[in-house]
Amino acid sequence: MISLSTLASLVLVTLVVAAMPIVLYRRMRAHFGLVPREAILGIAVFALFAMVIERALHGFMLGNAVTSKWLANPVAFVMYGALAAGVCEEVGRFLGMKWLIRREPAALQRRGPGLGYGIGHGGAEAWIVGVLVQAQWIVYAVLANNGTLDSHFESAPLDAIARIHVILMSLSPVSAGIFLVERVTAFVFQLGFSALMWQMLRERSRHALAVLIAAHALVGLPAALFQARLIPLIAADAVYLVLGAIVAAALVRYYRRAAEDIPIDARQP
């Protein structure tokens, strides 16, 4: 039986995460001249490079006898886990932004495209990795409270059903709060990566891709350490909470300064 307070917490934080990219896009669209193409590109890049290419890489690495044996070493697993997401996502971000520049070279004169792309990329992650998964557990919780959960999985193995029950029993308002922190900070990081990549491309930097891969890998390090069971979840989340606050503050300053540089008559109504 899942308590009503837990169920209400799960629903509330899921709605907050779902609304986060939509609200931000609507609020920033007029200020920075955002166009749907930028956000759609971010969504497409995340879906292809993170959900298809990165997962295919994981499948190969974990399914290959040689590489899976190498990844059994915690240090190797941490290194691989930190780099895999960085390489896949940042190569996709780099190629996507390069496509934007080729399509509209004048876009380099504005900071808005980086924000629009970041909202799409981060919003896709928030929805695919967060909202859809959490909505599934909300449905499972409702079914469990109605006593119909097992009947919906009568053809599934008993150990799989047992795992679902164990996870449901671990849900609480605290776990809902942890989910919110993780999704919000992940969204902020995606905005930060996108802003940094776009700014470096505006400055014609030759090291944009390498810098972003390194930055993404460093940010992914606490999660990799947790997955390797080298640090507890609370430690990883504490690091992300602090880093997320720093990145959010930097983004506010960066885009506030950018908004001040835009003539009023050049902004969208």
Image: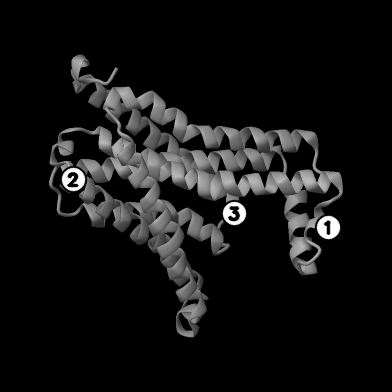
Say which element carries label 3: loop
Say which element carries label 1: helix
Left or right side of 105 for 240: right
Which label was assigned to residue 172? Answer: none
**In the rendered image, which residue does mark 2 sit on?**
103
In this picture, is 262 found above or below 49? above
Say which element carries label 2: helix
Marks 1 and 2, Cα distance to the nearest angstrom?
Answer: 53 Å
Q: Is disc 3 surrounded by few (<14), some (14 to 19) or many (20+) residues within 10 Å? A: some
Q: Residue 25 appears in which quarter of the rendering? A: top left
In this picture, is 53 found above or below 168? below
**In the rendered image, which residue does mark 1 sit on?**
151
Q: Is disc 1 surrounded by few (<14), some (14 to 19) or many (20+) residues within 10 Å? A: few
Q: Is disc 2 surrounded by few (<14), some (14 to 19) or many (20+) residues within 10 Å? A: few
Left or right side of 19 for 201: left
Marks 3 and 2, Cα distance to the nearest angstrom?
Answer: 45 Å
Observer-nearest of 96 and 164: 96
Say which amino acid is labelled 3. Answer: Pro
Residue 191 appears in the picture as rendered: no
Say which amino acid is labelled 1. Answer: Ser
Query: How is the model colour-coded?
Result: one colour
| Image quadrant in which the C terminus is located | top left
Sequence-earlier tag: 3 or 2: 2
Marks 3 and 1, Cα distance to the nearest angstrom?
Answer: 35 Å
Residue positioned most to the right: 147
Q: Residue at position x 66%, y 49% from top?
A: 136
Q: Position of residue 220 (x, y in %)?
A: 43, 54
Q: Are marks 1 and 2 in contact (CB under 8 Å)?
A: no
**In the rendered image, which residue does mark 3 sit on?**
232
Observer-nearest of 227 and 195: 195
Q: Residue at position x 42%, y 29% from top?
A: 24
